[in-house]
Amino acid sequence: MQKQVIDLDSVANTLFEYLRDVFYDPTKASLDVEALPESYQDLGNGLVFFADCVMETKRVAYALSQGDLDIPLPSRDNEIAAPLKSLHASLKHLSWQTKQIALGDYSQRVDFMGEFSESFNSMVEKLAERQHFLEEKANKDSFTKIYNRAFAMNTLERYLSQKMRFVLVFADLDGR
């Protein structure tokens, strides 16, 4: 039986060129696993799987860096992309929370993103304070601190639309 002579330099060069292309020119990356010596085909298949995971991870990382949260997530087999899947989930939840704040729900808090959480939570608290301040300015007389006509009219409209029972009393405090 004749022993097959394998040119290790040629195999190593083929695998190296493939990995280089995976990182620097993915559109060119191609490895013909069947052309490798049989004893290296499992390694070739493993490198193809690894390269697919790397390219998929790179695609997802780029999309996330552009703010695209509607991207298809990496496959379950891609353990390299696991942190990006977690980041994607956090960003989706954060996006939802931000929408809730825009609707006036200032109870939203973030506790899962380290230093960012402190900044986010501080921002929400400041927004809630400003909202309260502006409501006070809009609804109360600056001199007497009593609710003003605009507040009374808004309250009246709300009570009427909800068909609530109420008593209405108007008082003219300045005598005009």
Image: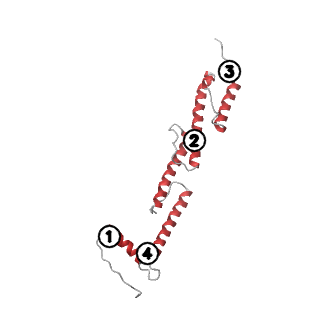
Instruction: Give the image location of residue 107, x and y in percent.
Output: 45, 62
Q: Secondary structure at mark 4?
A: helix
Q: How many angstroms separate mark 2 from mark 3 (CA)? A: 34 Å
From the viewer's perspective, is the residue at label 4 or at label 1 nearer? 1
Disc 2 to disc 1, how far (Cα)? 57 Å
At a point 52% along the width and 67% down the height, the residue shown is 126
Kind of residue at disc 3: Ile
The quarter holding residue 158 reads bottom left
Q: Residue furthest right?
A: 9
Q: Looking at this view, is 93 or 135 the one in front? A: 135
CA gap, disc 3 and disc 1: 90 Å
Spatial CA distance of label 4 from label 1 is 19 Å
Q: Residues within 10 Å of mark 1 (few under 14, many from 20)?
A: few
Q: Amino acid at mark 1?
A: Leu
* Residue 160 numbered tag: 1
Query: Does dot 2 land on a helix, a strand or a loop?
Result: helix
* Picture coordinates of residue 136, whole percent (x, y): 45, 74
Identify which amino acid the numbered label 4 is placed on.
Asn
- Measure how far apart labels 4 and 3 are at the Cα level: 87 Å
State the image coordinates of residue 40 (x, y, percent, origin top left): 62, 25
Mark nearer the N terminus (4 vs 1): 4
Disc nearest the viewer among 2 and 3? 2
Identify which amino acid the numbered label 2 is placed on.
Thr
User: Who's the residue at 53% across and 43% down the image?
Assistant: 82
Residue located beneath label 2 in the image: 57
For mark 4, what is the residue?
139
Q: Quadrant of the C terminus?
A: bottom left
